[in-house]
Image (tube, coloured by chain):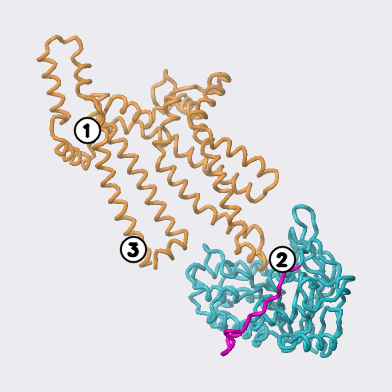
Chain colours: A cyan, B orange
Amino acid sequence: MGKVILEVKELTTKYITRFREDVYAVDHVSLKVEEGKSLGIAGESGCGKSTLALSLMGYYFPPLYYTSGDIIIDGRNISGMDPDDVRRSILGKEIAYIPQAAMNALNPTQKVIHFVEDVIQAHNPKATKKEIYELARERFHVLGLPEEVLHKYPVELSGGMKQRTVIAVSVILGPKVLIADEPSSALDVTSQKMVIKMLRGLMESGMIKSMIFITHELPLLYNVTDHIMVMYAGQIVEHGAAQEAVFDPLHPYAKGLMGSIIVPEEGLRGHKLTAIPGVPPNLKKPPSGCRFAERCKYVKPECKGAAVAIREASNGRTYRCIFTESELRETYQNGA
Amino acid sequence: MKGYRKYFTTKLVWFLTTFVFAFLLNFILPRLMPGDPVAVITQRVTQGMTSQSGAQAVYEQYAEQFGTNKPLWEQFARYMANVVRGDFGVSFSQYPRPVAQILGASIGWTIALQFPAIIVGWLIGNTLGALAAYLKGGFDKVVMPVSIFISNFPAFGMAVILLVVFGVNLRWFPTSGGYGFDLIPSASWGFVWSVIVHYQLPFWSVVLISIGGQAIGMRSMAIYELNADYVKYARFMGIKDWKIIGYVFRNAMLPQITGLALSIGTMVGGALVAEIIFSYPGLGYTILNGVIGQDYPLISAATLIITVMVLIANFAIEIIYGLIDPRIKAAQAD
């Protein structure tokens, strides 16, 4: 087992709405990312993926609030740290983030190099423009981006180029953890591939030590990450190695999610696409029992009773269901 | 830079075309007004004259001198030739003063009144708007309604209120003129002080009117920019707030620059109300007199000045914009 770079223990965070209601968007989430490894987080829109990303960066600005749990980056516990201190000493340097809307992530009226200067000087005020330029040039070169990009305004770059520029800027300080929040969702397939290749390259070259990749596109996760975590209604429902999580999911929601993937294969045109019926529960008043019970095909009356704990399965996998692994496998065999 | 040159040339051609049409209209429109100004002057000069043929001779002499007896196209040709030489003709209503002299005497007052007022109003308005967007809460709740209230005041209303309150009731400031009636323009302290005192009411009436609109515009632009994705990303990268605010307000300022340039361009028209109410000896007041006296040369020349100022302001915005906003440049390069 490699060195643990990021460890999150029982992290719970909430939003407080303008009507003073608490919404627990991240509910007792625990995870570990080892050096050189990547973790994928999957789930449908609104399940708390992006909130989890903000939470484990320590980015608590209203309406998001920290409630409990630990976030340990490379041995340093940052939970409970003042968000402004987090911004000063953690963000960009220890943890970097590639935002969902990377297309608009750069200030349209600022040349790329000037933004790079601002980023580096925010963490190292003594850095000279010349040093910064040399570093940026070298990094851009390694990442296969032309040097001219540095002298351009974001509006002069294509979508894919903008996205890659954002990635290159995000990792310029060599962060320990890179969080990529749907970095490729808005791109065409060719640009998507380049982005994925670039992210893999970052890991291989050691420019970043570990990565968390958030997406709703499961095939992408399988291609990029070592482990996959599936979230539902603020909770982890399945967590395991990428291969198993995609091809042999245990939790009924994870199974349904994998079943909703559109695979272009011959003879499958007439094949009915499966989708999970229903909508996720309202997190202002989450159900007391299993949160997926309302939409689950295999629901039993006891599902709706008390909160469901996480179970351990073979190979270090975990899932959140009242059924044992063998019970689930049996149900799936009979059901399918 | 090649794209920019093309952008520049296109804009220049457009503005020259606009200028030609505006020049033509400036000449024709006043002359389409009903009434005969030469007859009015003749009447004034021939008062008490009994001989009908004498009055007729005077009329014809003036018509000959002003060229009003010639066909319109010939008048236009003469007018154009004169304007090129900087000669705007002789005023009808203030005969025999040349138009250039009348305008020269009043334009300075207008610029001295309007230019600082517009700049000050713009600066105060934008600062208030930016602060309201950034501070939100109580400050915003006070600035916004007050801005809306003030910006909806008609210009004459504001001028009249200031006049009544500070001029008539409190007697802090004089109510009319550019300087004391009893003074002769000179470089003495007394005269300068008189100018400063007379300056206050018209100045603040223009400033107050423009603050509200600018503040509202800046506030909504800044709120929009503050929520932009690049602000979040800059925060995620650990950049300090004051730096991010710098990005935001620079971007929010861009559309406001258009507003500034336009109000500088239309400053003569904007000055009209304040100048009339405070009898300020500026261009607006002169135009009003020109229109009342059917003074073709004066109206044509004054509107020509306004046209040229608006065009230059517009042209300057386009050119400056192309330089400061890379988005315009990128769009033009396609």
Left or right of B220? Residue B63 is left
Per the rendering, the mark at residue B89 is 1
Sequence-wise, which precedes: disc 1 or disc 3?
3
How many marks are shown on the rendered structure? 3
Image quadrant occupied by the N terminus of chain B: bottom left
Q: Which residues are magenta?
A: A263-280
In which quadrant will I find the C terminus of chain B?
bottom left
The numbered mark 2 sits on a residue in which chain?
A: A
Residue B208: horizontal and vertical position, in percent? 54, 35
Query: Where does label 3 land, which residue?
Result: B6
Picture residue at 43% right of the left edge, 59% below the top? B323
- Cα separation between marks 2 and 1: 69 Å
Which chain is home to disc 1?
Answer: B
**CB under 8 Å between callouts 1 and 3?**
no
Q: Quadrant of residue B108?
A: top left
A41 is within the stretch colored magenta = no
**Residue type marked 3:** Lys
Q: Chain of mark 3?
A: B
Residue A36 seen in this snapshot: no
Q: Disc 2 marks which residue?
A: A88
**Of helix, strand and loop, which one carries label 2?**
helix
Determine the secondary structure under disc 1: loop
Say what secondary structure mark 3 lies in. Answer: helix
Mark 1 belongs to which amino acid? Gly
Query: Is A265 a magenta residue?
Result: yes
Q: A259 or B316, which lies in front?
A: A259
